[in-house]
Amino acid sequence: MELTTFLILIAAGLAAGIINAVVGSGTLIVYPVLIALGIPPVIANGTNTTGLCLGSIASAVGYRRELKGRMRRLAVPLVGTVVAAVFGAWLVVALPEHVFASVVPWLILMAAVLVALQPRVVRWLKSRRGDKPHSLVALTAGTSTVGIYGGYFGAAQGVFYMAVLGVLYDSDIQRSNGAKNLLASAANITAAVVFALSGRVLWIAALAVAIGAIVGGFTGAHIGRRLPDKAMRTALVTIAVVSAVVLLVKR
């Protein structure tokens, strides 16, 4: 790999790490870059997931304050997320590559819509008052369903998690964001293991993405508490729409 390409992937990982901590859609940055570099879709997906998983851990660590004293509540949903992510990643590996290549542009467009609508979701969550106890079964079912999607592709999985967690876990945005980062990191790590074992990872590219994502994950955790993200969201939606259109045209 040329040095320029390596640096481009580091930059993409950095941006994605920050976005994952703040919004939860970093895949919309890295995956199109990997495709543009000529990497096949399934390999690009495995490389993206593997490269970003360490950044997800960094984001979760950055939000450890919001997770303090809450691990018992999140233990069962965490296990459910891991099992679900194994199934999601297995679908990528087991099904023909053209299935993944066909569905991804539409997943990216769906992710763009979710990212665009997230402020409305956040406003709705903020309008809630109090934190009534919710069923652990419902919380686990909701987060596990998102875990399947996270294991399969993962773009905007953070938006899904925020919607589920805001209703079934905690209406406080920052505490839900901390839980989101924890569960998303579990889904990403699990999927990365499946992709690595099945040979769907380009390791040099994943290393470059990981270097940037780790820095971005820690940075994003601090930014996420205070950043007005309208500009970032607009850029992210634009990138997603352009990427989806390009992928559809290439088909």
Image: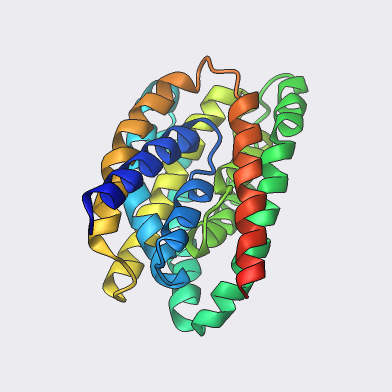
Q: Does 25 appear above or below 192?
A: above
Left/right placement of residue 172 relative to residue 46 reads: right
- Farthest-out residue, top: 226
Q: Residue at x 68, y 63 (%)?
A: 106
Q: Does 107 appear above or below 176?
A: below
Tell which of 206 and 154 is nearer to you: 206
Q: Answer whether residue 20 is visible to the viewer in this image.
A: yes
Tell which of 158 and 128 is nearer to you: 158
Q: Position of residue 183 (x, y in %)?
A: 46, 45
Q: Does 175 appear above or below 117?
A: above
Q: Position of residue 174 (x, y in %)?
A: 54, 23
In the rendered image, which quarter contains the N terminus? Answer: bottom left
Left/right placement of residue 3 relative to residue 93 reads: left
Left/right placement of residue 59 relative to residue 245 reads: left
Q: Answer whether residue 54 is visible to the viewer in this image.
A: no
Q: Residue at x 44, y 30 (%)?
A: 70
Q: Quadrant of residue 55?
A: top left
Give the image's coloring scheme. rainbow
Q: Residue at x 30, y 52 (%)?
A: 5
Q: Does 210 appear above or below 248?
A: above
In the rendered image, which quarter contains the C terminus? Answer: bottom right
Q: Residue at x 39, y 20 (%)?
A: 65
Q: Position of residue 191 (x, y in %)?
A: 39, 62
Q: Position of residue 233 (x, y in %)?
A: 63, 33
Q: How many marks?
A: 0
